Image (cartoon, helix red, strand yellow):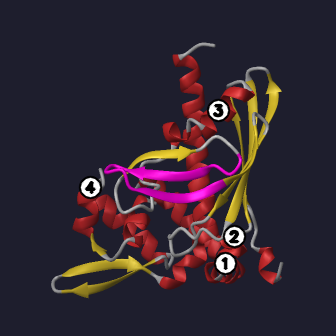
């Protein structure tokens, strides 16, 4: 999801994405391949590298994106609530 | 509402091992303690996610250099039971202050026991995001959920 959000700010190469995130280039490549397979991301060759961008039709996935987004966020919320209770017993 | 009102809501329910008041507190005033750092639309990297704890309060991000970028507004503030927040970020990932263009999420905190809370979450009215809403509707009809579910599964590894 972080990769998708990076691309929302503009087209990027694998290397540029990997520099901004705490993941390896190969992880970024793998992630991009999946995004491309489902049509959320498109790529084109520029000079000697692939540049990735959001596929305009991919906004069709907005609802599903939020489904995933909230699923992850609510898990993080749950952990934060329970952790904060342990830290500060009431 | 028009035919686009059929865009289905996103619903999730989770159980939290904490009293209801505390769960509400962490969801709202404690937003920053659980918000993913990369869930951000600002030009600057996110420093802090903020929910002003009152009806009409702003929900926004503050960047590392202090720039603020709105996400939505608190529409219903009923601690520790219910919260409704508008979501003004559509398919173009820009904030639109017009509430008629915003979707919204509702969070209900149901006391299961004094130390256990069921949190019911619904994000609804995606159709209000206009063109993006239309695209969502078409996408839902043509099988996007399956593709994205496959993506979500695969992406867990990446």
| Tag 1 subunit | B
**Residue A29 shows in the view:** yes
Q: Bounds of the magenta span?
A: B55-73
Mark 2 vs mark 4: in front: 2
Mark 3 vs mark 1: in front: 3
Find residue B139 and report its horizontal and vertical position in percent: 65, 80
Marks 4 and 3 on same chain? no
Residue at the spot of label 3: B25
- Work out which quarter of the rendered image holds the C terminus of chain A and state it: top right
Q: Is residue B57 magenta?
A: yes
| Left or right, residue A45 beside residue B42 | left
SS label for mark 1: helix
Marks 3 and 2 on same chain? yes
Measured in 3D between alpha carbons, the distance from the residue under mark 2 to the one under mark 4, in whole angstroms, is 34 Å
The answer to whether B106 is drawn above or below residue B87 in the figure is above
Please name the residue shown 38% across and 55% down the image. Answer: B67
SS label for mark 4: loop
Residue at the spot of label 1: B133
Mark 4 vs mark 3: in front: 3
Query: Image quadrant of residue A67?
Result: bottom right
Find residue A1 and report its horizontal and vertical position in percent: 46, 60
| Tag 3 subunit | B
Q: Nearer the N terminus, badge 3 or badge 2?
A: 3
């Amino acid at each position: 999801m972080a990769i998708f959000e990076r691309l929302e700010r503009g087209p990027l190469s694998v290397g540029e994405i990997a520099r901004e995130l705490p993941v390896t280039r190969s992880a970024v490549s793998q992630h991009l391949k999946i995004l491309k397979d489902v049509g959320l991301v498109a790529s084109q060759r520029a000079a000697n590298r692939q540049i990735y961008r959001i596929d305009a039709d991919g906004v069709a996935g907005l609802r599903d994106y939020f489904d995933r987004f909230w699923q992850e966020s609510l898990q993080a919320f749950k952990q934060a609530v329970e952790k904060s209770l342990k830290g500060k017993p009431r | 509402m028009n035919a686009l009102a059929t865009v289905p809501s996103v619903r999730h329910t989770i159980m939290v091992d904490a009293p209801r008041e505390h769960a509400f507190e962490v969801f709202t005033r404690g937003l920053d303690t659980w918000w993913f750092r990369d869930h951000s639309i600002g030009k600057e990297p996110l420093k802090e996610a903020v929910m002003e704890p009152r009806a009409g309060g702003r929900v926004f991000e503050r960047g590392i250099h202090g720039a603020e970028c709105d996400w939505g507004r608190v529409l219903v503030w009923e601690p520790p039971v219910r919260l409704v927040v508008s979501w003004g970020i559509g398919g173009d990932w820009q904030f639109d202050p017009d509430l008629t263009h915003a979707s919204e999420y509702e969070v209900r905190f149901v006391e299961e026991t004094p130390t256990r809370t069921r949190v019911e979450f619904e994000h609804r009215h995606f159709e209000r995001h206009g063109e993006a809403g239309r695209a969502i509707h078409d996408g839902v009809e043509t099988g996007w959920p399956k593709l994205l579910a496959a993506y979500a599964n695969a992406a867990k590894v990446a």
